[in-house]
Amino acid sequence: MEVEPEQTFIMIKPDGVQRGLVAEIIARFERKGFTLRGLKLQNVQQSFAEKHYEDLSSKPFFRGLVQYIVSGPVVAMVWEGKGVVSTGRTIIGATNPAQSAPGTIRGDYAIDIGRNVIHGSDSVESAKKEIHLWFPEGIVQWTSSLHSWINEQ
Ligand SMILES: Nc1ncnc2c1ncn2[C@@H]1O[C@H](COP(=O)(O)OP(=O)(O)OP(=O)(O)O)[C@@H](O)[C@H]1O
């Protein structure tokens, strides 16, 4: 039986877009060898931001987080590849940029937890939920011709 390829939902938050980090962030995922399956720039409605972050609704920073996410356009993406959820989180770095290692996106480009540039799904299950929420129209079906140069099988 063929195993479904793993996918993750990555969002460049409004500060990442405003600061011109879109190309840099995409490049890091591309060069690692992951495959881009969905990409769009969009403004987010308050109710949609609340839905995306519903698990955090009881947190004291929830209001501020929602305001931050609706404050400008975000880039929503789906990336695919072996272990992409966990490796994606490693590429992104720890939630608080003060603790993110240099070489990670947050370690290199952020200082404040409330302006940490990027979101990545924290499990395969939440990735499925987030991809369904952000890409109800579906994602792009294609196979990269580099696949066998990056993956042993
Ligand atoms: N103490 C805090 N103060 C302000 N904002 C916070 C705080 N903790 C978390 N956040 C914001 O909420 C987001 C979601 O928090 P969560 O704990 O799910 O971290 P995460 O999974 O690393 O982040 P993300 O879901 O954005 O990838 C964080 O990325 C950050 O933008």
Image (cartoon, rainbow, N blue to C red):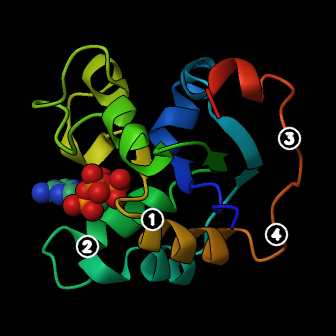
Q: Residue furthest front?
A: 1
SS class, disc 1 = helix
- The percent position of residue 14, horizontal first and vertical second, equals 51, 45
Read off the residue under disc 1: 124
Q: Which quadrant of the figure has residue 8?
A: bottom right
The residue that mark 2 highlights is: 62
Q: Secondary structure at mark 3?
A: loop
Q: Earlier in the sequence, mark 2 or mark 3?
A: 2
Q: Amino acid at mark 4?
A: Gly
Decide if residue 94 is on the left or right side of residue 116.
left
Q: Which residue is mark 4?
A: 138
Q: Nearer the viewer, mark 2 or mark 1?
A: 1
User: Residue drawn at (18%, 85%), measured in percent from left and top?
Assistant: 58
Q: CA distance from mark 2 to mark 4?
A: 28 Å
Q: Earlier in the sequence, mark 3 or mark 1?
A: 1
Q: Is the shortest distance between ligand 1 and the CB of mark 2 under 8 Å? A: no
Label disc, if present, on residue 80 of the rendered structure: none
Residue 13: horizontal and vertical position, in percent? 49, 46
Cα separation, mark 2 vs mark 3, equals 38 Å
Q: Residues within 10 Å of mark 3 (few under 14, many from 20)?
A: few
Viewer-proximal residue, 116 or 121?
Answer: 121
Three-letter amino acid code of the residue under disc 2: Phe
* Label 2 close to label 4 by CB (< 8 Å): no
Q: Name the mark nearer the viewer: 4 or 3.
A: 3
Residue 75 rendering spot, x and y as whole percentages = 64, 46
Q: Earlier in the sequence, mark 4 or mark 3?
A: 4
Question: How far apart, in angstroms, are the residues tagged by discs 2 and 1?
Answer: 23 Å
66 on left or right of 95: right
Point out which mark residue 143 bears: 3
Crowding at mark 2 (Cα within 10 Å: few <14, some 14-19, many 20+): some
Q: Which of the two discs, 1 and 4, labels the residue nearer the N terminus?
A: 1
